Amino acid sequence: MTVRIGTAGWAIPRPVAPGFPAAGSILARYAQVFTAVEINSSFFRSHRRETYERWAASTPPGFSFSVKLPRTITHEARLEPCEGPLARFLNEVAGLGGKLGPILIQLPPSLRFEATGEAFIRGWRDRHSGPTVIEPRHPTWFEPQVEELLARSEVTRVAADPAVVPGAAEPGGWLGLTYTRLHGSPVMYASPYTDAALEAVAARLGARPGEAWCMFDNTRSGAAAADALRLLSRCKPGNLASTALETTADHASLRPRILGAIDDRPD
């Protein structure tokens, strides 16, 4: 069991800054506390391969990035064949090297599972052999035949909160990897999570076999980093993924600072 906890992007809001090292770039500081990050900016714009290489070099061995597929593929082309943009994206993210984790495919709520979606999933492994997670938001993607297709294709269905359709809160598809996205509740992208909610998340992560990712996307009000720190403190250390920094004295001294930076008042 390996649990990776992080946020969408690597911002360090001022209230939790004491839980991070003071020196270095924001990404380098972030990567001394968390072992993963979700790159969402790739959804909106292209990044040069050299940029991904620089980001990878800023983080220690054992750190991992998930990267969101561009909206030109998911929302504009709506998974219709677009080999040029897809090839360009995969070439760019290859700059992360061994630190490239899951590709995140988030679909628009209006996109039904039809022939185009089925063809995309069936052909995905011809394009990319690495871990892949998909966040569909239309009820047609939650039918048994789709679950079977995702499992055969080794594509993990995201467990999302809030769940936009019944079943979306639980992981699906291929379960060799689980990937949880916490968008904030009751206000999506903004609300922090309660202590009770984080306790429940920690329990679920601890019960999953294989590798489990949990990414906080409630970044609008700066709650993501604080929630991720609070969840980190609730997970069993033996379950957490580690980086090369874990064995150093400097990194070991971070844990008391992390706990001291968390506003952990009762609900």
Image (cartoon, grey):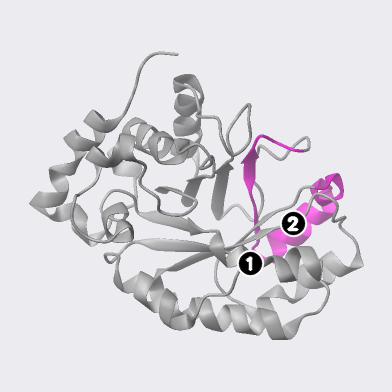
Q: Residues within 10 Å of mark 2 (few under 14, many from 20)?
A: many
The relative height of residue 147 versus residue 76 in the rendered view (above or below) is above
Q: Does the magenta portion include 146?
A: yes
**Residue at point 25% right, 40% down?**
19
Q: Residue furthest right?
A: 115
Residue 25 visible? yes
Most foreground residue, 207 or 202:
202
> Which portion, as a residue range, is magenta?
138-164
Kindly indicate the quadrant of the structure image that contains residue 233: top left
Mark 1–mark 2 Cα distance, whole angstroms, equals 10 Å
- Mark 1 / mark 2, whichever is N-terminal: 1
Q: Which residue is mark 1?
A: 69
Please state the horizontal and vertical placement of residue 32, each as a whole percent of the image: 25, 53
Q: Quadrant of residue 253?
A: top left
Residue drawn 81% across and 79% down? 81
Secondary structure of the residue carrying tag 2 is: loop
Left or right of 226 in this view: 142: right
In the displayed structure, would residue 218 be above or below residue 100? above
Q: Position of residue 174 (x, y in %)?
A: 64, 56
Q: Quadrant of residue 29?
A: bottom left
**Residue 39 against residue 13 in the figure, above or below:** below
* Mark 1, other Cα within 10 Å: few <14 / some 14–19 / many ≥20: many
Indicate whether residue 8 is drawn in magenta.
no
Picture layout, residue 10 above or below residue 101 = above
Query: Residue 229, how many percent across, how many down?
Result: 35, 37
* Viewer can see residue 97: no
Residue at label 2?
107
Give the amino acid type for the residue marked by disc 2 in the picture.
Leu
Most foreground residue, 142 or 14: 14
